[in-house]
Image (tube, rainbow, N blue to C red):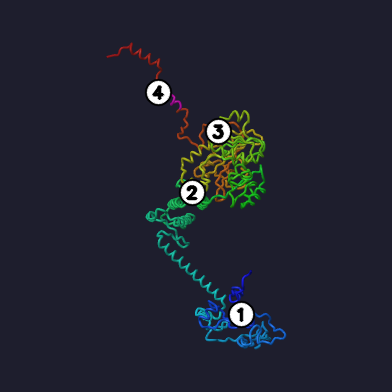
């Protein structure tokens, strides 16, 4: 059983929202529709009409054929009775010359050549006769409700626009009103902000930045307004970049720098000590970029384990799991950078199978600089958590021998787990103090192994290059921590150099690296090793990175430190890192020189003495020498024998 058709209930159908009705369709549609049908249906239908005292609507008539069949009397209009044909008499047509239309409608409703236009018939001040989608006439105004009459009058006032045009105009008016309201609210908010901020600094080009007074700084609220501080940092930077022209009269550069350091410490949450160190390393514009880069985490990178798979296959497998990735760069053949992932990147089946290792981009560089060869003996002195050790085994294709050492036994558990998961079979794990390694393992080192071919030392450091991972470094480091790390690194690098065999046919190299950017932990330690051991610096083999310092403040380092490499988060989009590569050319340990060097002058220096002064000094020493014990006894006996005179 289907739904019954209700002819009285008809939904509106017709042209689209922005399409206009063609003029002249009223006459054509009027041929097929029943008379007396209003444009808008009354609520309640015939029952409502009977209650209001109006005649009920006639039943709808649907024409079956436009032409009468043979034997039937002709009717005035097809589909209508002869009595109602007078109501649908077409209006007179005017012939209007037109370029596009050459058609004319005659009084009988036939179409003739020439353009035409319907004459408007005004009935009781109503609008043009409108026909709905089914052709119902709306000329009888007495059947319309008051709301409908008002709507028709409003449309006539708008100039006879169609419904679609009026809707568009209403939408445009609403959008304009909303935009005006938003602009007014923004202006009000801007006025309130200007009134509330007494210390708001206008840093336009025309105005000049002025240092705030101490009273203005004291009046600032206890939680500082970061917007004001940020604007003040910008203005201060502009003045310092062109200090001679833009400085305020009577103000020194030190005052501007002190204000800048205080503002940056408040805005970026750094300690005053660390900011002073960073201001010594970087120029001011680069310092701002470095601080901003530390607020953003570095991209997640992984290293393909070529012992089990290829990078192409791994990338395709991860893409199928919903991972968005790209190759790390031209400098790496195994790295992939992960942008986003629909699955945990550290819990995929590929990760559990050992196809890749989660590893930072900067930690790949030391192993690339070490360049291990097959069948070599390699020492990783500080190996935890095992990323660099597994990369070395990967480059050696599980040949030779790797000694993975770390002083922390707890961290060695992760090393063992990663080596098993990645399929490394040529590694030996040890738990020794790296500073005592050559002494404790001297029998194994030189008696059995004959020394290592290459040594990798990823020394423990202050972590100033990985602030984005550990923001606590901003405030918990001081001068003692830096000097303590520097002293430990000096001991470790001497131990690493002593563990290498200079007579190795393929090796004799040491790579020293830290995740710090402090000069005390990098160039200072490397310069110390150059003075204490028979080593020299060689090229790291990395095509990018900034050169190390050869002079820093009042210190002067060896000129070969230009071959070292520094990496920064704001320039290379990786963690801050330092890498230096040594070549050992002799196993002998040089003796300490008695003469003082310019870099390490003793506290007291004796002036050179001439021969005359030496003789005089020897005479004085002889005179001041205490007498011998036997001489004392002899003199005492002589005194007893000779009586004293009265």
Q: Give the secondary structure at mark 2.
A: helix
Residue 286 position (above or below residue 191):
above
* 504 to the left or right of 210: right
Residue 559 position (above or below residue 253):
above
Which of the two labelled residues, at mark 2 and mark 1, occupies the earlier sequence position?
1
Which of the two labelled residues, at mark 3 and mark 1, occupies the earlier sequence position?
1
Residue 526 position (above or below residue 68):
above
The magenta segment is 614-619
Q: Marks 4/1: CA distance? A: 148 Å
Residue 270 drawn at (x, y percent): 46, 48
Q: Residues within 10 Å of mark 1 (few under 14, many from 20)?
A: few
Q: Marks 3/1: CA distance? A: 103 Å
Residue 432: which numbered mark, if any? 3
* 228 to the left or right of 126: left
**Residue identifier under label 1:** 60
State yes or no: discs 3 and 4 in contact (Cβ < 8 Å): no
Which corner quadrant holds the N terminus? bottom right
């Amino acid at each position: 059983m289907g739904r019954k058709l209700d002819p009285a209930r008809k939904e509106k159908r017709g042209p689209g929202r922005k399409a206009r009705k063609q003029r002249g369709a009223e006459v054509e549609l009027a041929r097929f529709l029943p008379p007396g049908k209003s444009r808008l249906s009354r609520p309640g239908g015939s029952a409502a009409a009977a209650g209001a005292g109006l005649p009920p609507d006639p039943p709808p008539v649907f024409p079956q054929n436009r032409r009468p069949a043979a034997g039937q009397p002709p009717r005035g209009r097809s589909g209508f009775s002869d009595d109602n044909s007078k109501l649908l008499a077409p209006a007179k047509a005017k012939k209007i010359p037109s370029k596009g239309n050459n058609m004319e409608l005659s009084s009988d409703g036939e179409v003739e050549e020439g353009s035409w236009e319907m004459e408007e018939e005004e009935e009781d001040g109503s609008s043009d006769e409108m026909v709905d989608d089914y052709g119902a006439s709306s000329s009888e105004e007495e059947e319309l409700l008051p709301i409908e009459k008002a709507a028709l009058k409003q449309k006539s006032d708008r100039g006879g626009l169609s419904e679609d045009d009026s809707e568009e105009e209403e939408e445009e008016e609403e959008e304009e009103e909303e935009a005006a309201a938003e602009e007014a609210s923004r202006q009000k908010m801007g006025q309130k902000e200007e009134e509330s901020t007494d210390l708001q600094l206008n840093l336009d080009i025309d105005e000049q930045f002025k240092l705030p007074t101490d009273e203005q700084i004291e009046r600032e609220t206890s939680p500082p307004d970061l917007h004001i501080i940020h604007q003040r940092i910008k203005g201060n930077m502009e003045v310092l970049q062109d200090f001679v022209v833009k400085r305020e009269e009577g103000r020194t550069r030190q005052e501007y720098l002190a204000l800048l350091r205080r503002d940056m410490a408040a805005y970026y949450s750094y300690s005053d000590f660390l900011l002073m160190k960073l201001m010594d390393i970087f120029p001011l514009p680069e310092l701002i970029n470095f601080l901003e880069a530390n607020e953003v985490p570095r991209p997640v990178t992984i290293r393909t384990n070529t012992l089990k798979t290829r990078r192409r296959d791994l990338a395709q497998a991860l893409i199928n799991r919903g991972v968005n990735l790209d190759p790390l760069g031209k400098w790496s053949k195994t790295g992939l950078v992960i942008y986003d992932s629909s699955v945990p990147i550290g819990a995929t089946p590929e990760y559990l199978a050992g196809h890749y290792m989660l590893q930072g981009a900067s930690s790949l560089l030391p192993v690339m600089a070490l360049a291990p060869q097959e069948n070599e003996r390699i020492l990783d002195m500080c190996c935890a958590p095992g990323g660099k050790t597994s990369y070395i085994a990967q480059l050696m294709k599980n040949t030779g021998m790797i000694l993975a050492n770390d002083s922390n036994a707890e961290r060695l558990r992760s090393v063992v787990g990663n080596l098993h998961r990645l399929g490394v079979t040529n590694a030996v794990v040890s738990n020794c103090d790296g500073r005592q390694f050559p002494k404790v393992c001297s029998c194994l080192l030189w008696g059995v192994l004959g020394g290592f071919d290459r040594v990798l030392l990823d020394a423990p450091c202050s972590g100033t290059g990985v602030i984005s991972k550990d923001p606590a470094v901003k405030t918990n480091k001081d001068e003692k921590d830096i000097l303590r790390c520097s002293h430990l690194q000096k001991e470790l690098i001497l131990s690493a150099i002593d563990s290498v065999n200079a007579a190795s046919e393929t090796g004799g190299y040491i790579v020293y690296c830290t995740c710090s950017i402090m000069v005390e932990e990098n160039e200072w330690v490397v310069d110390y090793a150059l003075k204490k051991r028979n080593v020299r610096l060689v090229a790291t083999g990395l095509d990018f990175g900034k050169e190390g310092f050869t002079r820093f403040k009042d210190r002067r380092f060896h000129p070969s430190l230009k071959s070292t490499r520094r990496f920064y988060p704001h320039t290379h989009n990786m963690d801050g890192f330092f890498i230096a590569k040594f070549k050992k050319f002799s196993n002998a340990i040089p003796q300490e020189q008695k003469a003082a060097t310019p870099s390490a002058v003793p506290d007291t220096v004796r002036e050179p003495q001439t021969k005359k002064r030496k003789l005089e000094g020897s005479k004085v020493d002889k005179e001041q020498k205490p007498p011998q014990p036997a001489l004392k006894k002899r003199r005492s006996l002589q005194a007893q024998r000779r009586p004293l005179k009265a």
